[in-house]
């Protein structure tokens, strides 16, 4: 037979383990809640940014924006070809002007 003192001692140890386990679990839950709150705050900051990106994407798809208009203008490729040819033929001339 076990003594009453031994049973009481076991009970105290069990309570101590249970209390520590509850404390660890509580701390873990608190950390998870804090992490979730941080993630929600980050997502709240991302939403306006993503909305702005979506607006820009729609504008590009519709061909709006000055740079896109310039790129899509029919005379731009021809002008770029002509400029390329001038640079090939007279690159030394261009470089002389740059030095002055």
Image (spheres, grey):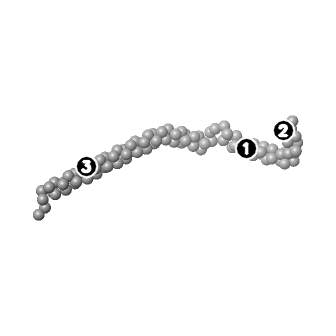
The local crowd at label 1, few if under 14, some if 14 to 19, many if 20 or more residues have their Cα within 10 Å, is few
Circle 1 residue: 74
Residue at the bottom extreme of this rendering = 1
x, y (%) of residue 58? 56, 42
Q: Say which element carries label 3.
A: helix
Rounded to the nearest angstrom, the CA distance separating label 2 from label 1 is 30 Å
Q: Say which element carries label 1.
A: loop
Circle 2 residue: 98
Q: Are marks 2 and 3 in contact (CB under 8 Å)?
A: no
In the image: residue 10, left or right of residue 76 = left
In the figure, 78 relative to 2: above or below? above
* Residue in the foreground of this view, choosing between 48 and 42: 42
Q: Are marks 2 and 1 in contact (CB under 8 Å)?
A: no
Residue at image position (28%, 50%) is 20
Q: Are marks 3 and 1 in contact (CB under 8 Å)?
A: no
Which is nearer the N-term, disc 3 or disc 1?
3
Residue at image position (48%, 39%) is 45
Q: Which mark is residue 19?
A: 3
Image depth: mark 2 or mark 1 in front:
2
x, y (%) of residue 74? 73, 44
x, y (%) of residue 92? 88, 44
Which is nearer the N-term, disc 2 or disc 3?
3
In the figure, 1 relative to 55: above or below? below
Quadrant (top left/top right/bottom left/bottom right) for the C terminus:
top right
Q: Which mark is residue 38?
A: none
* Residue in the foreground of this view, choosing between 21 and 66: 21
Rounded to the nearest angstrom, the CA distance separating label 3 from label 1 is 78 Å
Residue 8 visible at all: yes
Q: Say which element carries label 2.
A: helix
């Amino acid at each position: 037979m076990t003594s009453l003192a031994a049973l009481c001692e076991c009970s105290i140890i069990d309570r101590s383990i249970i209390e520590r386990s509850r404390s660890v679990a509580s701390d873990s839950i608190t950390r998870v809640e804090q992490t979730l709150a941080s993630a929600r705050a980050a997502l709240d900051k991302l939403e306006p940014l993503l909305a702005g990106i979506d607006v820009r994407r729609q504008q590009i798809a519709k061909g709006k924006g000055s740079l896109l208009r310039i790129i899509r203008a029919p005379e731009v490729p021809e002008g770029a070809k002509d400029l390329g040819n001038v640079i090939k033929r007279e690159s030394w001339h261009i470089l002389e002007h740059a030095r002055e």
